[in-house]
Image (tube, rainbow, N blue to C red):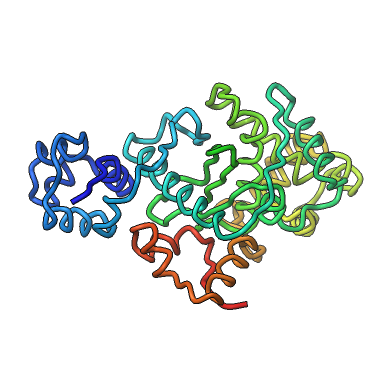
Amino acid sequence: MDFTPQRLTLARKRMGLTIAALAKATQISTRSISAYENGAAEPTAPTARLLAEKLQVSPEFFQLPEVDEIPLEAVSFRALSKMTARQRDAALSTGAQIVEFDTWLSGQFRFPTPSLPTLPGYEPALAAAAVRAKWGLGEQPIKNMVQLLEAHGVRVYSLRDDLKELDAFSFFADGKPFIMMSARKSGERSRFDAAHELGHLVLHCEHGHPRGPEAEAEANGFAAALLMPEAQVKAAGLRNATLPTVLRWRSHWGVAAMALTHRLRELGLVTEWGYRDLCIQLSKAGYRRGEPGGIPREKSERLRQSLALLRQSGVTTADIANELGVAPSETKSWMMGITMQAL
């Protein structure tokens, strides 16, 4: 049978398994699995089926062409030093499969050409202002962060629930910007995550700048300035804001109450004591763990329309999964909660 060794490695890493763990799960020797992965031997058809079953792919998955891997240095991960190698490998392998799906989808439909400014070395607030100017946003609140990104060529997808260590990450592949987001966070925090990853794409990702706490702080500063422009926050009369005021205005900008409180301190609109008092009140009210009474999570209009048109043409989720050699549940996990419904 035709066999692509790299596909086995990709599927194994996607499941967060070492060679030893896969050997234990399949009762295939580590020597044999290593030989399959380095191309020194090919599995028999029954062995390939067993590997496919344990790795939740189809046997045909191993016969497809090689996938372009995403190098670690191309990706913006938060708290990279705290991630295990298996967690990183699972994220990168999932990202590679999503890029493969996006390439297939782009062959069916035409999507906007990426139009992100690249601004390495800019101050985060100035970079956010430049993005707002380039995209014609003015100073008004951003109504839908995901759809704004998609309108400018950014591919936005969700991550499987088992990748719970990740909030979001971003990278460029084939000249296209990608953002992968957790499907478990509140609508407000997801918007901030999307803006944060945009900050990495604009400030760091394509240019290979150093990562770490400094880069994360810059991406946070970019996100805050993009979602809550300084001039508008200062014009809103939020000096020494009370808790009810913060909760009312968080909805105006579509941000978490804690994020707005931090922005008020950053802009000198509350004292250090006032900031701490607001944080204590918000924590007691449950706003540190979540966003009570918040907004729904934003979804991809690009994916909704694409899947609807595919469904209208008779293409099902199972058809897409077969095309990629993965389980339908895998492809569904990338779609931000969107199901295939005809327009």
Examine the rendered structure and indicate whether residue 33 appears above or below residue 313.
above
- The residue positioned 61% from the left and 62% from the top of the image is 299
- Residue 309 in view here: yes
- The residue positioned 60% from the left and 51% from the top of the image is 283
- Is 72 situated left or right of 250 in this image? left
Q: Percent from the top left, x then y, of residue 333?
A: 45, 60
Examine the rendered structure and indicate whether residue 54 appears above or below residue 258.
below
Relative depth, front residue between 192 and 134 = 134
Examine the rendered structure and indicate whether residue 214 appears above or below residue 231.
above
Q: Percent from the top left, x then y, of residue 243?
A: 75, 54
- Is 300 situated left or right of 98 in this image? right
Q: Percent from the top left, x then y, of residue 276?
A: 68, 40
Quadrant containing the C terminus in the rendered view: bottom right
- Residue pushed farthest front? 1
Relative depth, front residue between 160 and 263 = 160
- The residue positioned 48% from the left and 58% from the top of the image is 334
Q: How many marks?
A: 0
Q: Quadrant of residue 33?
A: top left
- Residue 278 in view here: no
Q: Quadrant of residue 127?
A: top right
Relative depth, front residue between 139 and 46 = 46
Examine the rendered structure and indicate whether residue 53 appears above or below residue 203.
below
- Is 271 situated left or right of 17 in this image? right
Q: Percent from the top left, x then y, of residue 24?
A: 11, 47
- Is 127 situated left or right of 25 in this image? right
Q: Quadrant of residue 122?
A: top right
